Image: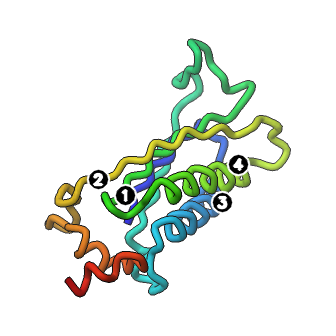
């Protein structure tokens, strides 16, 4: 049940690329979080695109957009869902799917910065309620956390 915010330069990813990328990012999240197979489970993976204008991103004090496509990804997930290996897998897979979504013919490399944040148990609110890990395991169908549902 991650919330994923993708910050990318304005105009790099058109509507079709954003739709493909949202699907690919959702697939990455479902794999690394071990989200259940029921379609309702995947509906709790939210992806938001936030585009920044040229001249609004700096690296080393300069504008890097002529040399590369910088993409910042904020990946928030419930505490206890991802371990070190899953986070490493997520960073690798996100780099791959975002790079694959860039426009054909754009020679600039995509460089991602993925910030993964575990939301402490009891600090996730949704639909007017606080969700704890057993609630999330039930709603999202986390395959590796189903023992919490019975508890």
Q: Nearer the viewer, mark 4 or mark 1?
A: 1
Q: Which of the two discs, 4 and 1, labels the residue nearer the N terminus? A: 1
Residue 131 quadrant: bottom left
User: What crowding class fits label 1: few (fewer than 14 Cα within 10 Å), some (14-19), or many (20 or more)?
Assistant: many
The secondary element bearing badge 1 is classed as strand
Q: Which of the two discs, 1 and 3, labels the residue nearer the N terminus? A: 3
Q: Which of the two discs, 1 and 2, labels the residue nearer the N terminus? A: 1
> Is the Cβ of the residue at disc 1 closer than 8 Å to that at disc 2?
yes
Which one is nearer the viewer's eye here, 42 or 78? Answer: 78
Q: Which of the two discs, 4 and 3, labels the residue nearer the N terminus? A: 3
The secondary element bearing badge 4 is classed as helix
Q: Position of residue 148 (x, y in %)?
A: 26, 78
Q: Nearer the viewer, mark 4 or mark 2?
A: 2
Disc 4/disc 3 C-alpha distance (Å): 15 Å
| Residue pointed to by mark 3 | 16
Please give the label number shown on residue 77: 1
Q: Which of the two discs, 3 and 2, labels the residue nearer the N terminus? A: 3
> Is the Cβ of the residue at disc 1 closer than 8 Å to that at disc 3?
no
Q: Position of residue 36 (x, y in %)?
A: 44, 81
| Residue pointed to by mark 4 | 99
Q: Quadrant of the N terminus?
A: bottom left
Which one is nearer the viewer's eye here, 35 or 10? Answer: 35
**Residue furthest top in the image:** 61
Q: Position of residue 56 (x, y in %)?
A: 52, 24
Residue 124 quadrant: bottom left
The secondary element bearing badge 3 is classed as helix
Please give the label number shown on residue 119: 2
Disc 1/disc 2 C-alpha distance (Å): 6 Å
Q: Nearer the viewer, mark 4 or mark 3?
A: 4
């Amino acid at each position: 049940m991650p919330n994923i915010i993708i910050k990318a330069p304005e105009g790099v990813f058109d509507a079709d690329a954003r739709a493909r990328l949202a699907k690919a990012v959702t697939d990455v999240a479902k794999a690394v979080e071990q989200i259940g197979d029921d379609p309702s489970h995947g509906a709790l993976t939210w992806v938001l695109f936030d585009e920044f204008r040229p001249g609004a991103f700096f690296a080393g004090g300069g504008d890097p957009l002529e040399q590369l496509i910088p993409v910042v990804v904020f990946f928030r997930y419930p505490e206890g869902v991802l371990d070190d290996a899953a986070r490493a897998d997520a960073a690798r897979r996100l780099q791959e799917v975002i790079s694959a979504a860039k426009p054909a013919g754009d020679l600039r490399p995509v460089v991602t910065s993925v910030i993964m944040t575990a939301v402490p148990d009891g600090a996730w609110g949704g639909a007017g309620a606080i969700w704890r890990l057993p609630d999330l395991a039930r709603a999202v169908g986390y395959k590796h956390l189903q023992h919490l549902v019975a508890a």
